[in-house]
Image: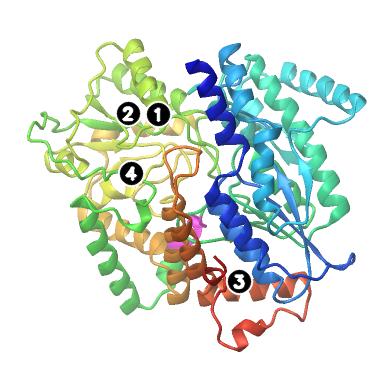
Amino acid sequence: MKLLKRLLHTIRLYYFNSPDEKDLIQAYARRQPASRTPADAPAIAVQCSADILYFGVFGEIVTALREHFPLHADQYVFRSLRVGESHFPIGFLWTALVENGWSDRRWQRLYAAYCDRVAVRSAAWLSPLAELRIWRQASRLWRQARDKNDFASLTVDGILIGDLIIDAYVRFKPSPEFDLRDRYVLRILRQALRDIKKARAYFGMRRPKLFLTSYTSYIQHGIPARVAVALGIQTVSFGSYQQMCKPLSQEDQTHLAEHWHYHERFKALPVTEQRARRASADERLNSRMRGEIDNAIGYMRTSAYAAHSTEIPDVKGTVIIYLPDFYDSIHVYRWTAFHDYWEWACFTIDTLSSAGIPFLIKAHPNASPDSKLVYDRLCARYPALPFVPPGVTTAQLAEAGIAAGVSPRGTVLSELAFLGVPVIAAGDHPHAEFDLVLPPRTVADYRSRLLNATQLPRDPQRMRDQACEFYAMHNLLPDPDEVALRDKWLAVRATTMTEDTVSQYTVAKVIASLADLGEAPAFRKYIAEWANHIAPGQGHLSRRDELGQGSSLSATV
């Protein structure tokens, strides 16, 4: 009986829209034009993300664009892989129950409030002949791959997919270590080839004027975004915490901020502004050291500096290894010396151990339950693995005299530099253009830096200044309107953030935060720019803006 109740509860939860979701559907449906959209009206594509954040923001964009002219909005349903589906039979059966065509329809009904049709379903099968060809091609590519490095560079029809497949394997297997010979890699590779075929067919024939996507990682997000960009479709991502949106290009296909221009842009500022921004960043980083969570780390549930232990070990001259979330996308940046975080962790531990360099491990302050299981796996492989006691902060470790900090690419890199501690990264990272932490290109380069970890040069004031410069460029946008938009964007994120995939938000708060976002001057500026791109000459202020009226979302519920 308990199993039956759980089954019915799961079906109701994942297959049917909640009362809050129905309210959101009605709110957006009422704001759409009553007249029929002409057949020759321009089209845009909207990623059907199973996240109220993107449902709401994309809804604001589509609705605002329709204030300029009629348009068609197509849903791009990208769901194809399921976390844990390779764990047969229980994992496979449970994931198949929770995520399938019926659960997709729950979200399709939501997006139908402002979209006209479902244009692409990634999980849908192609014709038997096409599927057979894809199977044969995937099998051949899988067998030919020699190692991780070879597979990471796999390109099909001009679209790089190897890096996306590796990250998808780590996330959806799930496994902290990429195993090229696992048949689940073949499953993901087949889906990637199917996604390329569907994306090329849709974007090549439909030619939407704009494609809105959340992230650019994994095959589900990355392949449609890369194909769209390759075909000249204006593609905009919304996956960053530093800005609401970012246009993609052939040269830059990541949803992350353009950190490789930070240093030159800061140096181009007037000296007085440099000083002011550095001082502001210094104040904010000091607040972070006191345990406060600022916008830059708003994704963290608790601050890494919130607790202060009195049991600080003797760490003078010791290297601290900062563990990441092992299931994050390691290829989201421009390059990496490693292809999964497990490989990085083991290589780092082995290198320091063999060289006799003392080190301690510091767990991620907001590690997921799965990542904590990886810590157990590390301890099983290295029985005497020394961990920093819980509650000891990086500020306390710096004060105690650690020699250096090692992290693949986390925010701790600039925090350590701010505290005057040398740092070592494992690839491209947001701080890459500042010489406080130069990014290694190869494993050999990374190894040489590890071997010199206790002799790295120290210039505490210079390191602190550069950490502040990075913070200023990464988080303190120069345009006040952009700052206001970013803060409103983060406010929407906060109202829709939840611990699981089931909506636990309050619809009134979501609607209020979306209405506030829609009224932001920078938001209306983006709408005008996109409208002018979609229909040149029509990217003017809408009638609502001319009259000085605000968003009508809050008034419709």
Q: Which residue is rendered at x = 63% and y = 14% of the image?
A: 181
The mark that comes first in sequence, 2 or 4, is 4
Are the residues tagged 3 and 2 within 8 Å (C-beta)?
Answer: no
Q: The residue under label 3 is which amino acid type?
A: Tyr
The quadrant where residue 385 appears: top left
First-in-chain label (3 vs 2): 2
Asked whether 540 or 28 is in front, the reply is: 28
User: Magenta: predominant secondary structure element?
Assistant: helix
Q: Amino acid at mark 2?
A: Leu
Mark 1 to mark 3: distance in Å?
45 Å
Give the Cα distance between marks 3 and 2.
48 Å
How far from the left and from the top, in percent, is residue 205? 88, 52
Q: Please give the residue where the numbered disc 4 appears in the rendered image.
A: 301
| Camera-side mark, 4 or 3 | 4
Of pointers 1 and 4, the one earlier in the residue sequence: 4
Give the labeled residue for mark 2.
451
Quarter of the image holding residue 46?
bottom right
- Asked if marks 1 and 2 touch (Cβ < 8 Å), the reply is yes
